[in-house]
Amino acid sequence: MRAESRRVDLLLPLFVGTLQVVGTLGVQWWQVHDTGMLRVPLGPLGYALLLAGPLALTVRRRHPALSVIVSVDATLLFIGLGHAYGPVFLSPIIAFHTAVVGGHRRVAWPLWGLAYVFFVVYLSWFAPAPPPGWFHNVAMAALMGLVLAVAEFSRARNERQAEHKRVEREEVRRQASEERLTMAQELHDVLAHNISLIHVQASTALHLIEDHPEQAKTALTTIKQASKDVLTEMRSVLNVLRDGAPRSPTAGLDRLDELIERSGLRVVKNVIGEVRPLPPGVDRAGYRIVQEALTNVTRHAPGASVTVALDYGPRALTLQITDSGGNAPGESLGSGNGVPGMRERASALGGTLTAAHHGRGFRVEARLPIPEESE
């Protein structure tokens, strides 16, 4: 694209210069001999002025203001010296259009107005031919106004296209940012749950390994499965960064029983309403909220019993995770990002989440709206 643009920048001045010289030679004969016009033939200065405008077009992209100043001034001087009217106006029109499109209106507009005033004054009082009259001046104003309107239209169109591209780039960046946030949440949920589970089961295994080796073996088996799961889910999340890499199905509520079994907690699950497929976003968020709530119980209330209630309503899925409070000291509640992360997941779907003490324990309740089209 750049090579093509450079080629145009080189060929356009050559084409315009040739057209101005040949065209002027073609029209000057009858303008010189016409008693109504009385123009003068080309001389060395005339040829130089004819070529000055096209030469200025070679820098019209890098220095559009300079290009329009040189081409307009050269044209005005060419006409002021009495040379023939003709294609000499082509180079200032191109330079003016480029300057306006490039945003140099403060230079181009006054110069264009100055050129019109020059022509009116010159033709009315200084040209060797009789004054052309008001109709000619109006027609000239209309023609120069048309050139200005086309240039302004092109500028506005380019600005709209640039704005559209900018909005598209912003949208791509926003989507990438949201994807990174989603991956960060996924990694947080996966790591927090499984590492907490491994920590609890490892502590249990160390406590029981001498007196109750069979129970310690069960804890170690859970650790093995949890570490396998965390590696599998991390690979699923990180595969998104690889072009063309397949991504494993994301965990959903259909794997809730497996999650409860691996948690090592005493969990009672209650389901209200008819279990049915949910939109992927709601399904994934519901699973992650339960997972994070169970992780918080493991951290903050070890030894607590938990009730997980799922209410499949017609317009929303309601989750309620309540624990009885632990018998052993855990980490201080609110020491991490678990609750804000759950609330952010619910909020992203237009839902709500509350988390507060409930008796001796703690309750997390989330309401996730279900879009009508998904029913």
Image (cartoon, rainbow, N blue to C red):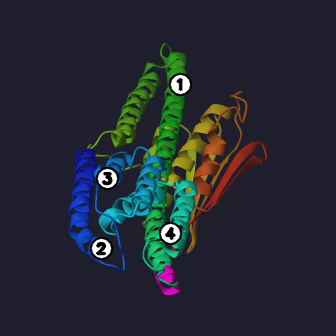
Which numbered disc flags the more N-terminal residue, 1 or 4? 4
Residue pointed to by mark 2 = 31
The secondary structure type at the circle numbered 1 is: helix
* Amino acid type, residue under disc 1 in the picture: His
* Amino acid type, residue under disc 4 in the picture: Phe
Q: Position of residue 372 (x, y in %)?
A: 51, 76
Q: Quadrant of residue 350?
A: bottom right
Q: CA distance from mark 2 to mark 1?
A: 100 Å
Task: Classify residue 41 as left or right of residue 275.
Answer: left
- Which residue: 36% across, 80% down? 36
Q: Position of residue 247 (x, y in %)?
A: 31, 46
Q: Position of residue 321 (x, y in %)?
A: 63, 51
Nearest to the observer: residue 191 or residue 218: 191
The secondary structure type at the circle numbered 3 is: helix
Which numbered disc flags the more N-terminal residue, 4 or 3? 3
- Graded by Cα atoms within 10 Å as few (under 14), some (14 to 19) or many (20 or more), the crowding at tag 4 reads some
1 or 3: mark nearer the eye: 3
**On residue 199, which mark appears?**
1
Which numbered disc flags the more N-terminal residue, 1 or 3? 3
- Which residue: 55% across, 27% down? 200
Q: Is residue 137 magenta?
A: yes
2 or 3: mark nearer the eye: 2
Residue pointed to by mark 4 = 126
- Which residue: 49% across, 57% down? 167
Q: CA distance from mark 1 to mark 4?
A: 99 Å
Extreme-top residue of the structure: 210
Which numbered disc flags the more N-terminal residue, 2 or 3? 2
**On residue 54, which mark appears?**
3
Res 261 visible = yes
Residue range in magenta is: 134-139
